[in-house]
Each structure stands twice: as structure tokens, then as C-alpha cells.
Image (cartoon, rainbow, N blue to C red):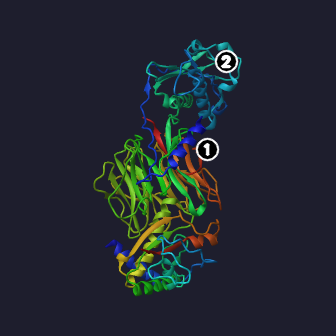
Amino acid sequence: MKKTLIALLMMSAATPALAQDLGQKPPEATPVVTTEEEGLSGSVSFEGNLEDLGIAIPGFATDRNAQTPANTSGTAALGKELAQVVYNDLKNNGLFKPTGPGSLPQPSYGEITAPSWGTWSSRSSEMLVQGYVRAGADGRLTVGCYLYDVALNKELARAGWVVPPVDWRRAAHKCADLVYSRLSGESPFFDSRIAYIAETGPKDNRVKRLAIMDSDGANHRFITNGRATALTPRYSPDYRKLLYLSYIDGNPRIYSYDIGTGRQTLITESRNPTFAPRWSPDGRWVLYSMAVGGNTDIYRVSAEGGASVRLTDGPGIDIGGSYSPDGRQIVFESDRSGSQQCYVMNADGSNQRRISFGGSRCATPEWSPRGDQIAFTNASSFNIAVMNPNGGGVRTLTNGWQDEAPTWAPNGRVIQFFRTERNSGRTALYQVDLTGQNLRRLATPVDASDPAWGPILP
Amino acid sequence: MNRAFTTVLLVSAAALSACKKEPPASLPPEPEPTVTSTPNTGSTAPVPGTQEHFVQGVNGQNVIYFDTDRYNIDSADAAALQTQAQYLSRYPQVNITIEGHADERGTREYNLALGERRANAAKNYLVGLGIAAGRINVVSYGKERPVALGSNEAAWAQNRRAVSVVIN
């Protein structure tokens, strides 16, 4: 079903637009209502490594098999799909030892809040995730999610959400986030989206289109048609806008694309080329880099428009820029020393100081949402690395032929980046844990680069 | 004024710099002209104002090459740009766009800025030779438009370039 959806989208997006490069406009994010189920606290019986923690995730139950736009076979089949999404989230990220609904008995609706402990204690899973889905009279879906400790016969957490049918996967991601957060103590990250550049065509004639998808690759949409090269997107923190670079008028310039209206505007009225757009954590400010006569500096402008403020003014290429989570500092890249290195400055441009001294080139720094780490591209070896905000504690996380452009998961535990293949120039998105463990590829319909992971959805 | 200062430095650095650059083993194919030239009926020579005429007029020296991470105009580049300047002086109605490019061994955003810097270095040199700045447009493609497709030193040397293209 997902495949059909993507195929349809591709066909509609392939129809050339008249005046613009923009295709079908993506749906606006709808808020998810959390129902009254209160999370419980308490200790967990399991004391081993989290990657060895067995979690059984049987199909979610339904009170009655109702019709829903979310699944052609009704809410019973949808329940299995919900559990499958939760299972895939945990499995694909190397979290715990989950078992999916395909190899587990299906609990009844009544058992969701009163587990059949005997059934589950005879299996090797220490934890049990159960859930239900109900279709309301208004068509909206209510999804409940329960986490149980099987050894203790005890509930550890529960939550429920009311979603429009189109957002059913978000309820599953929220359930996976609940399980992950409760068991690991980390913040959630599954209920989020990624903007990136979809690539097709030969190396000397690549077609590059702005595209978006959920954190697991589902709900994929192309936003531009590919007539103009699109590069380096960034989701606004509220997911209402996308900043990206387009050659639509023949020159590289940053546009702000409004997802609600489908319109886009230049981030600054200037004839000069602009690159490397970045949002402030509160979404009120935009950083961009502008080349004037070959000299590139970093500027700040209000997200609503208006006059820009130049933050750097030295000769050389000052580019990029990533705010610390508190918005007070900016890490950026500059070749003022003769090679690409990473620098930190105050948000007003004062107190610029170099932080990278490892002997390699430091590029595309991105401040972790947790604030304690900066990810960057080692532009000498072309690997992804992290360091402390003072430049110390450098750890290299990847070793592809060319890895670049790290972007953080909303909780700062996972880094996504893109990898280019030698000679062919083909690109793909990869993820790696902050620990350097669990490197994996994120499947995309076509080649992919320039990922930008947004925060937890509003 | 900062910029003017940089420009002066640039040109003088270019004049002083020795040719340390490895020339590409083979010349890359000519870029496609960005304008559609008038259809050639067969035997007629290229017409002034076309990319074909320009390339012929500068003996194929409409492309200059750069070292890794560099944007200085070395002696070979200077010779090519002098030829271009002569052509542009002779045909004052012809305007050009200089496309700046980088090889694939750089991060995307930095390469966009680097391509811009290279194209401007070429532009500034032509302006220094008396060509009006208003006749020269500049655009950076970063690493987005390679002409040599391999992932090796020879290919990268061909891709680190500034290409002069006639605007119609």
C-alpha cells in the first residue's frame, strides 16, 4: 500500500508545473491529542543490557472491526499494522530485542488493560507492549498504548492519542517513543520528520528534488519537480516551513517554502547568492550565508523577513551555523585560518573563537539538541565525528568513502548523514548512534542526500 | 572596502604566484552553451556573440583550473583570461557568465562558496584587464556539475574550474 502511494505521488509530481518548480503541496501537520491515560512510574525488573531486553509487541486490538480510511480492511487489520510500526521503529534502530505481531498471539480487546500474564511469561520477553485502536463516530482514531513488565506482572507506562486516520502512523511512533523513553530514560525521537534531497540521473546531470518523509521513511512526498536543482533543506521547528536552496532563477538562493500556502519567498532580497540556511531553535531567526564578491559571511534575519544583520566579516568563507539549544551561541565553519575549521560565536556575532584543532578540516557543525555535543564532517577523511562544544573529546563515528552533513535526531542520540559512493556518485542516507554503534541505511525511494531531521512533531 | 582590499591582494598574489598547479591530463569536454545558438546551416563559420565563436576566438581557453581548495589565478589562468579579455575587448556587445565549480571532495555548502570565490577571482582578473564588471555575470555550481566523472585526482583537477560562457 505504501509502495502504491509513493508511485502515485511520483506520477503526480512528475507533471510539470507552469510557473514554479513546486509540485503538490504536502499536508499540514495536525496536532495529536493525548487522551487522559496517565503514565505510571515504577522500577523495571530487568537489569541486563537494554539491547538484550526482550519486548513482545502483539497486534493492537480493536473493540469492533470498524471501517477506516487508514486501512482498507478495517481497524482489526490496522491494529496489526500499528504494532508492526512500533516493532519496526525499535528493530530498525537496534533498540531492545523486539518480537513483532507476526509471530505472537493476538490479545483480545479486553486483555489490553488486563494482560494474560500466563501467555507472556511462558515466552522469553521481559516486556510486553499492548495497544488498542478504536474508530470514533467522527472518523478519528483513538489509539492506546500500554507497556508491561512481564516478570512483575505490572504496568510501567500507558498513553493514548486521538488522531485523524491519515496520521495513524504517528500514534504508532508515539507508542514506540513511550516504550523507548520509559525503558531507556532518553527523550523520544520517532514521532518526527526528515527533509532531504532526492537524487536521480547520471553523475553529470543529477536531478535534485526537495522531499520529506517520516523518521522511518514512510509518508514520503516530493515537494519540487526537479526542474531546478534543490539543495540543503531545513525544517522549521514548528514544521510549517522549509528553508532550502534552489536554482529556480538560475542562481543559488535560499527560499522559505510555506507548507500551508504552498508558496515560497526569498529569504533576503539581494542579488547575491545565498547558501546554508539554518533555523534558530525557537524558529524566530534564520541564519544564512551570502557571498558578496566571492567573500562569504553569515547573516541573521527574522523568520518574518526584514533587515539582515551580518554576524561575521572577515575575509574568507564563513558558512553554515548551528545554534546551541538555548539559542545563545552559534557554531559555524570558516576557512579564515587557511582551511575549513569550526568556530563558536555568541548569537550576536561577538567572541568568535576556533574550537577545532585536530589537524583535520572541520565542516558542517551541528549542535546537538541536548547541547553537550557538536557533530561535524571531518572534511579531510570525510567521516562523521562528534566533539564537545569546546572542541575536545573528538570521536569519529563512520568510515565511508565520503560521509558528510550530520543532522541530529530530536533527542540527540542518533545522527543521520549522507554517504556518497566512489565513482558512481550515488548517495544514500545513513544513521549511526551517538556511541558509533548500529550504523544502518535508511531506505529511500531514490538516492538521497542533505538530510535534515526535525524536532518531535507538535 | 574590505572587498576591494581582498581583490587587490588577489590580483597581486596571482601575479606573484608560481605555477604549482598540475594541468589536467586532458581537457574536459566543452560545457553546453547556456543559450541556444542560431542553427548552423552547415558550412557557415560561427557567428560573433555565440559560445562557439567565443571558444574558437579564445583558442579553447574559456576554462581555467584551480588547485585543491585554492582560487588564485596562476600564470596559465592569467594567459587564458588575457585571451578572453582580448576577445571581449574586440566584441564589446558580448557579455559572459563565469561559472565557478569545485570537485566532489568537499562538503556541499563550502563548495558552493568556493565555486563563487573562484568565479569571482576570474571575474576580478578580467576587470583588472579593463573589462567592465557589468559585462561579467558570476554563478557558482559548487560540486553539482562535474565534467569529469571519475573519483580520482585527474578527474578532480578537471572539475576545479571556472568556465566562461557567452550570454545572449
* Of labels 1 and 2, the one closer to you: 1
Q: Amino acid at mark 2?
A: Trp
Residue B129 in the image, given as x and y percentages of width and height: 40, 85
Mark 2 Cα-neighbour bin, 10 Å: few <14, some 14–19, many ≥20: some
Residue A328 in the image, given as x and y percentages of width and height: 37, 48
Secondary structure category for the residue under label 2: helix
Q: Is residue A297 above or below residue B50?
A: above
Q: Amino acid at mark 1?
A: Ala
Q: Is residue B74 above or below residue A292?
A: below
* Quadrant including the N terminus of chain A: top right
Q: Nearer the viewer, residue A263 or A443?
A: A263
Q: Position of A334 compared to A103: left or right? A: left
Residue B24 in the image, given as x and y percentages of width and height: 61, 77
Q: Which residue is mark 1?
A: A443
Q: How many marks?
A: 2
Q: Are marks 1 and 2 on the same chain?
A: yes
Q: Nearer the viewer, residue A152 or A22?
A: A22
Host chain of mark 2:
A
Residue at x 45%, y 41% (from the top left corner)? A26
Residue B160 location, quadrant: bottom right
Q: Is residue B3 above or below residue A262?
A: below
* Quadrant including the C terminus of chain A: top left
- Outermost left residue: A307
Q: Which residue is mark 2?
A: A120
Residue B126 location, quadrant: bottom left
Residue B151 location, quadrant: bottom right
Report the disc number at residue A433: none
Q: Position of A434 compared to A119: left or right? A: left
- Outermost front residue: B41
Q: Give the mark nearer the N terminus: 1 vs 2.
A: 2
